[in-house]
Image (cartoon, rainbow, N blue to C red):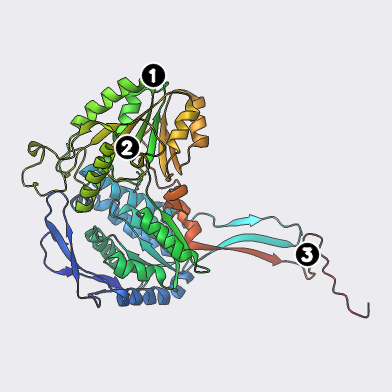
Amino acid sequence: MSEQIQETYKHYIDGEWVEGDGSETFESVNPANDETLGEFHAGVESDVDRAIEAADEAFDEWRELSHIDRAEYLWDIYHELRERTDELGEIVTKECGKEISEGKADVVEAAHMVEWAAGDARHPKGDVVPSEIGSKDSYMRRKPRGVIACITPWNFPVAIPFWHMAVALVEGNTVVWKPSSVTPWCGQIIAEMFEDVGIPDGVFNLVQGFGSEVGNPLVDDERIATVLFTGSSEVGHAIADTVGGEPGKLAACEMGGKNGIIVTEDADLDVAVHSAIMSSFKTTGQRCVSSERLIVHTDVYDEFKERYVELAENVAVGDPLDEDTFMGPLTTTDQVEKFGQFNQLARDEGATVLVDREDLDDAEIPDGHEDGHWAGPFVYEIGYDPELRCLKEEVFGPHVALVEYDGDIERAVEIHNDTPYGLSGAIISEDYRQINYYRDHAEVGLAYANLPCIGAEVQLPFGGVKKSGNGYPSAREVIEAVTERTAWTLNNSKDIQMAQGLSAEITTQDD
Ligand code: UN1
């Protein structure tokens, strides 16, 4: 795709690029300067219907291929992701605003996921299970579920689509994918890759557009076997509610977090400050795993605060294509507005503001980027109170609370767990007992010690507890959402023998 608008980009349905039935188009913009990157056709319900029909028809043949044959298409994509990492990383950065090392890491993470899924095709599948009866062989086998709906967010516009789709396809499902309407350019490029590798028509389908016109009919359609969703908790919970009422259909949703880092009295403060800065400000705070709460023991609070605040005052916010930038702009203007509202909420709830770079100085904004969606760190301290909304609600921006605690690790974990969310978190401590207590009692799906709470690798399960998720739409654990288990038992004898001592004798009235 060129950077100039030369055409309006289309949907990819049943192996064809199509304009669809809608009359609306929408634009992708660069958050660093608000310039238009491309124009796209917005899908409507009948486009979704055709995409599902194509995926449904393609399923019968696709499922008959071996895992290894299906994985061949993914290996070609893997090589393309590897060869084009720099180029695609730049596109990610231009479309979603994260600084260039993160743009490239997004593509590398996608390549890792594809490598994992394609490599897994040659690994043993299922289990051999013992039977009480010597002549019976029992197995747990997996079957593909059918057509999988994938709905993905803008913050990892290349990696997360492959979290959803790579394992789903290798396992024999077909997919209909709706990328975020904020990052359609990345969607276009991924669809071009599937076309390049010659994936059979209908196995992969892309419908661009909005939740109301594309996402909703996709979730509601009875031909969809599983909905995989990564994004906001409002949308994710609505999807889980809808799908929960439809027998046989599954939803696996991964939503946000209000992630915390505990810094205990036994912390190495170099590790603590480094981990906290990375967790709060990488991706401009727009990871589901970003940390918006730092829970710090009173013995180390003042020193931690001084060092953290000094860095937060100075981290380089700027042009995300510049390698010296630490933090790019927020992705959308809605995020800028939400960030401002939550900063005000924290002030209203009694916060003492320590760093306020909400409105960057003109001098900090790079030339030609005056219309970018800029925001810098906003850091405050506030006394812990279970009623405070600013300690419970996710902002998805560089908005960070410092909370001082006095007491033992149990107290720290109690504060840490006092949010409706439970995605990621970390403890910084040199004391293994504190670390192990955190590991066993922190209410999160991803837990770290002496590390940032971001940066999970694809071979780990990725998902949360409480409001952060149900099911794992991501990485290796997605297999549970895209396959059906069969408990398969074969009798090698001519006699029928039952387990549990159940008699197999058929008696008649004459007996
Ligand atoms: C997200 O937080 O939205 O663990 C995805 C990480 C990345 C993925 C983050 N592997 O930080």
Image quadrant where one finds the C terminus: bottom right
Q: Quadrant of the N terminus?
A: bottom left
Q: Position of residue 254 (x, y in %)?
A: 41, 53
- Which of the 4 image quadrants contains residue 101? top left
Gap between marks 1 and 2 measured at Cα: 22 Å
- Disc 2 residue type? Ser
* SS under mark 2: helix
Q: Is the CB atom of the residue marked by disc 1 within 8 angstroms of ligand 1's nearest atom?
A: no
The part of the image, by quadrant, that contains residue 427 is top left
Q: List x then y, in percent, for residue 288.
A: 35, 47
Tag 3 and tag 2, C-beta contact below 8 Å = no
Residue 156, numbered label = none
Mark 3, residue position: 498
Tag 3: amino acid:
Met
| Front residue (pair 127, 231) | 231
Q: Earlier in the sequence, mark 1 or mark 2?
A: 2
Q: Residue at x 23, y 36 (%)?
A: 378
Q: Could one spot residue 198 in this view of the protein? A: no
Above or below, 196 against 58 in this view is: above
Residue 78 versus residue 198 in the image, above or below? above
Q: Amino acid at mark 1?
A: Asp
